Image (spheres, grey):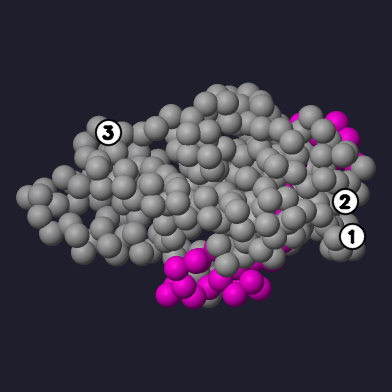
Amino acid sequence: MKVGVVGVGAVGAATALSLLERGGMCRELVLIDKDFARARGVAADMRYAGPLSPMVDLRAGDYADLAGAALVIITAGVNEKTGGATDRSDEQGRLRLVDTNARVYADVVPRIVAAAPDAVLMVVTDPPDPLADLTRRLAGHDRVFSTGTLIDSLRFRVHLADRIGVRPRDVHAMVVGEHGTSEVLLWSSASVSGIPVLSLLAPDGTGTEELREEIETNIRYANITIIEGTGASQYGIGAVSARLAEAVLRDEGAVLPVAAYHAGFDVTLSLASVLGAGGVRQMYDPAMTEDERKALHRSVDILRKAKQRALSAAGAG
């Protein structure tokens, strides 16, 4: 199978490397960037590691080289640091990038669809959810999803595991709604082997509010913390993108917190989504407390406004 990565900045390169390291998913990987020299350089660098990896035909290319692709991963656009979205006091967070990156998508998505009309499109660029709504409008089909809150859910599991003293893989916890500051951490269903994490964090049932606030802050602004240290948040989302590509290419029917268009909410958001060959084919509404449900609806309202901004900025409203 052929996979394309459009946008070979920090996230695109990390995604390509993760795809190679997972192995066995695709036989062809095409890297596309507005700076062809960069795409060619990244492809050459990775190809020299070819003898250590499963056989993949990796090359830089143009949009025409996406013909026959089963999946195209879109990482093109400005990142948070370049776009000025690294202020923890800014309620917009990643949504500050909507207008700029919507214009980028207005250019690249029609080119992708013209070359690979049957491909599933995965949106990674921030903010991914409104850009997925725009991509769906520009592509004219529903085979579109975003990485959503999978990375946030993994961060949630890691922070809980650190506090409890167990492996992150043994923690079950989910974040839903926006991949951004309005995201909703589902504390009520977070567990370890069926044991509620809140009872493990505070056996006497008290004193969890400060801890919850600290963990939520760490997760909501993890990207900024990473950017402050490295300049770009890339490795985690690269690994996430490769895992999601695997679910699509192998038609797994994996249930993951990724984002797709929800007709009931009329917006793209993350819930418990079934991901396979055609993208997200079903979305389930997880059990929530009343407060969590209210928070989800606030997130939906924010995403609806961001969707309209994206459509307007791209001239697709």
Which mark identifies residue 60? Answer: 2
Looking at the image, residue 67 lies above or below residue 34: above
Residue drawn at the location 39% of the way across and 52% of the way down: 298
Would you say 171 lies left or right of 271 here? Answer: left
Q: Residue at the spot x=85%, y=46% of the render? A: 111
At mark 1, the secondary structure is: helix
Relative to the observer, which residue lies in front, 200 or 64?
A: 64
In this picture, residue 308 sits left or right of residue 9 = left
11, above or below 255, in the image: below
Label 3 secondary element: loop
Name the residue rendered at 62%, 65% in the picture: 97
User: Marks 1/3: CA distance?
Assistant: 49 Å
In the picture of the structure, the residue carrying the numbered disc 1 is: 36
Residue type indicated by callout 3:
Ser
Label 1 neighbourhood size at 10 Å, few (<14), some (14-19), many (20+)? some
| Residue 165 rendering spot, x and y as whole percentages | 27, 51
Q: For residue 244, which quarter of the picture?
A: top right
Q: Which residues are magenta?
A: 65-94
Q: Residues within 10 Å of mark 2 (few under 14, many from 20)?
A: many
Instruction: Decide which of 222, 19 is in the foreground and name it.
Output: 222
Residue type pointed to by label 2: Ala
Magenta stretch: helix, strand or loop mostly: loop
Task: Locate the N terminus by quadrant.
Answer: top right
Residue 20 position within the rendered picture, expressed as x and y whole percent measured from the top left:
71, 43
Residue that label 3 marks? 193
Of callouts 2 and 3, which one flags the residue occurring earlier in the amino acid sequence?
A: 2
Closest to the observer: 226 or 63?
63
- Residue 271 picture quarter: top left
